[in-house]
Image (cartoon, rainbow, N blue to C red):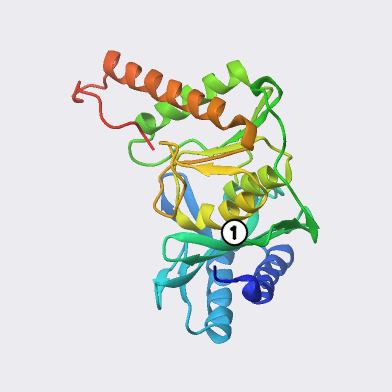
Amino acid sequence: MTDYRGLLPIAAEAVSRAAKAMRQQSPGTLTVKGDRDVASQLDYAIERDVQTFLAAETPEIGFLGEEQGATGPSEMRWVLDPIDGTANFVRGLPMCAVSLALAHRNEAVLGIIELPFLGLLYRAAKGGGAYANGREIRASSTSHLNDAIVAIGDYAVGPDAEARNRLRLALTAQLAAEVNRVRMTGSAALDLAWLAEGRLDAALTLSNNAWDMAAGVVIAREAGAAVIDQNGAAHDLDSTVTLAVAPLLVEAVLGGYRKSVAKATEVRILYPPPGARTAPDQHEC
């Protein structure tokens, strides 16, 4: 197995630059990307700075950023979310992160997440364990759903949000009936880091982009969590659903997710929107 740990210092420096900018600079002008979806001027500035830095340090590795897309080689690629939780950042809420991963083909193999306003830095490389502020971390040993604290990703916005939110609402209701508490932090990177550290017992995200998930996925896995897709298969960068779960809760959480899919599909059949097809589609992701 390739040892990716040698690239951790470069990744850490890139993330440090981004986190410093978040602490010291204002969001700046907001750019509307879609319905209730914005990027700040600082999102773009951080992405440009990190891409330039990484290109100089590792010219053989490509780059994928949330705001500007992909450049360079694709076999190995840095994957960056310059500010994960932009809506929180713009409002002065501290639940936001810099998330940088290294992907080898379709697998995240290194990840660093910094929470600049909470003083937390998470890192992991495949086969090397997961760490928070230099301390090795492990996912929780929670074994019963009624003891679990579970984070769920944001509700959908944009086109077809109402349809796509049927599953999210069904899953929220399912969780509310079974778990200790449900949380929505607004940052997928934070959710996965806190799952890895045992602060959360599951982190469920139903609409995925590689830059949102990649770093957190490798950190959670190295901490002993299971990270799977909606079918129970190992999560990869093409997965559309992320179910990241403490190891003793996998079957219970996957079972709850499947119940939610059935309920959301039933609602669609019984109450189709005007002009919609009555035959059920694939479940929403």
Q: Quadrant of residue 62?
A: bottom left
Residue type indicated by callout 1: Ile
**Could you tell me which residue is drawn at 45 percent across and 52 percent down?**
236
Seen as rendered, the residue at the extreme front is 1
Residue 284 located left or right of residue 253: left
Residue holding disc 1? 83
Foreground residue among 254 and 152:
254
Which secondary structure, mark 1? strand
Any part of residue 88 in sight: yes
Disc 1 crowd rating (10 Å Cα; few below 14, some 14-19, many 20+) is many
Q: Quadrant of residue 17?
A: bottom right
Q: Position of residue 206 (x, y in %)?
A: 46, 39
Taking 121 as reference, is 229 above or below it? above
Seen as rendered, the residue at the extreme top is 270
Q: Position of residue 115 (x, y in %)?
A: 71, 56
Foreground residue among 256 and 250:
250
Quadrant containing the C terminus in the rendered view:
top left
Q: Position of residue 89 (x, y in %)?
A: 64, 53
Quadrant containing the N terminus in the rendered view:
bottom right
Q: Quadrant of residue 175?
A: top right
Taking 48 as reference, is 247 above or below it? above
Any part of residue 153 in sight: no
Foreground residue among 188 and 61:
61
Q: Position of residue 104 (x, y in %)?
A: 47, 67
Taking 166 as reference, is 69 above or below it? below
Marks counted in the figure total 1
**Could you tell me which residue is drawn at 68 percent across and 47 percent down?**
196
Foreground residue among 119 and 48:
119
